Amino acid sequence: MWTTISDVLADTGLDTLKTVPVLFLAYLLMEYLEHRTSERTTRLIRRSGRWGPALGALIGVVPQCGFSAAASSLYAGRVITVGTLVAVFLSTSDEMLPIFLSERVPAASILKILGTKALLGMMAGFIIDAMVRLFRGRKHRPKEDAMDVEHMCKHDHAHQESDGILISALKHTGKITVYLFLVSLALNALIAFIGKARLSAILSDRLIISELLAGVIGLIPNCAASVVITQLYLEGMIGAGPMMSGLLVGAGIGILVLLRENEPLKKNLAIIGMTYGFGVLFGVLIDLLHITF
């Protein structure tokens, strides 16, 4: 038993260390993009009007670590529509992209997943906005508010300008490396003691149930959720449907910002429910249609 434990620890540590250089380069690029484009993209989404779901989904899929939180703040200030917010939530991938890059997933597969998330986010956003307009019986337009929206964009990815791009990338790499090690350690231990085939059957051979459970993991307002879902998929523990459900629902800390900044609570719960519902529905459809990435 102790031999198995030591082997699991050694293999997990070695596999995690192999991902660190690519993770760092990915986060360095992400930090550069965020420093250079965050204010510009926020201004762009504020002016998007009824095309907000399309623009929100496209911007959300770009690896900018705090955009879901910024979108929540914009919605709290009634600057964007609820459909735009949900589109951003669904398209945001949090830590999926750097992990895929570090694991050398084929570029075609990554682009297909990102494109699918953006497309599904758009669809859901337009459907929600259309339902809101129909329900209210009038044209639904976001209204500018006197709130200082930029001031509201506080989130755990925020970093001080004094840190700079390099230090921020190092901090982010260190944090995700720890998450990766812990998640991989748990998965490797389960595989060692239960068996990969049996564990895969438990997690992935239950249509709808797998998507529902993956969606619940995605609701965890922390980047660890996307790490768990991504690793389960890369290890072959879950299929494309549950993976997509978990990553669609996983809006990172955007949900926390929404709960903190927006009122009333029942409206926030409805938004979270719509995000979860669309994420699970799309994941089930992907399974039923046998779509692979």
Image: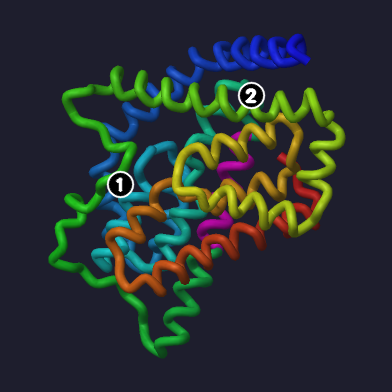
Percent across and percent down for residue 109 are: 66, 34
Q: Quadrant of residue 234?
A: top right
Q: Nearer the viewer, residue 89 or 2?
A: 2
Q: Secondary structure at mark 1?
A: helix
Asked if the magenta segment contains residue 241, the reply would be no
- Can you tell which mark lies on residue 41? 1
Q: How many marks?
A: 2
Q: Residue at x 75, y 36 (%)?
A: 237
Q: Residue at x 30, y 18 (%)?
A: 166
Q: Quadrant of residue 163?
A: top left
Side of 1 where 161 appears, left or right: left
Residue at which label 2 appears: 185
Per the rendered image, the range of residues in magenta is 110-123
In this rendering, the answer to whether 230 lies above or below 119 is above
Side of 201 where 221 appears, left or right: left
- Can you tell which mark lies on residue 52? none
Percent across and percent down for residue 242 are: 69, 49
Closest to the camera, between mark 1 and mark 2, is: 2
Side of 229 where 270 appears, left or right: left
Q: CA distance from mark 1 to mark 2?
A: 38 Å
Q: Nearer the viewer, residue 3 or 147?
A: 3
Q: Main secondary structure of the magenta part?
A: helix
Q: How is the image coloured?
A: rainbow
Closer to the chain start, of discs 1 and 2, is: 1
Percent across and percent down for residue 196 are: 82, 30
Q: Amino acid under label 1?
A: Thr
Percent across and percent down for residue 285 are: 73, 59
Question: Which residue lies most toward the front here?
Answer: 2
Q: Nearer the viewer, residue 177 or 124?
A: 177
Q: Secondary structure at mark 2?
A: helix
Q: Amino acid under label 2?
A: Leu
